[in-house]
Image: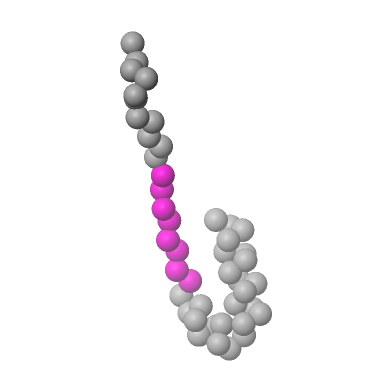
Amino acid sequence: MLSENVEQRKLAAIMFTDMVGYSALSQRDAQLALQLLEEHRHLL
């Protein structure tokens, strides 16, 4: 029989990604950098 004080747990995962050259690209072409960032988010 389960106790009423049973602790419920959930598994979570954290993912970090990095886009090589993003800072330099955002300085050269901010609009293109934002478009690539949105595509990256869509893929993930």
Is 15 magenta? The answer is yes
Which quadrant holds the C terminus? bottom right
Please state if 12 lies on the left or on the right of 37 as rendered: left
Q: Is residue 2 magenta?
A: no
Tell me residue 21's x, y (percent): 48, 79
Q: Residue at x 60, y 77 (%)?
A: 33
Q: Give how far across and how far down residue 12 sits, in percent.
A: 41, 44
Q: Which residues are magenta?
A: 12-19
Q: For the point 65% across and 72% down, which residue is it?
A: 35
**Residue 36 in which image quadrant:** bottom right
Residue at 35% from the left image edge and 29% from the top image edge: 7
Q: Main secondary structure of the magenta part?
A: loop
Total label count?
0
Horizontal arrangement in the rendering, residue 7 relative to residue 29 (left or right): left
Comparing 35 with 6, the one in front is 6
User: Quadrant of residue 8 in the image?
Assistant: top left
Q: Position of residue 30 (x, y in %)?
A: 62, 82
Relative to residue 12, is residue 37 depicted above or below?
below
Is the N terminus in the top left, top right, bottom left or bottom right quadrant?
top left
Please report the residue visible at 34 percent of the width from the left and 25 percent of the height from the top. 6
**Residue 28 versus residue 35 in the image, above or below:** below
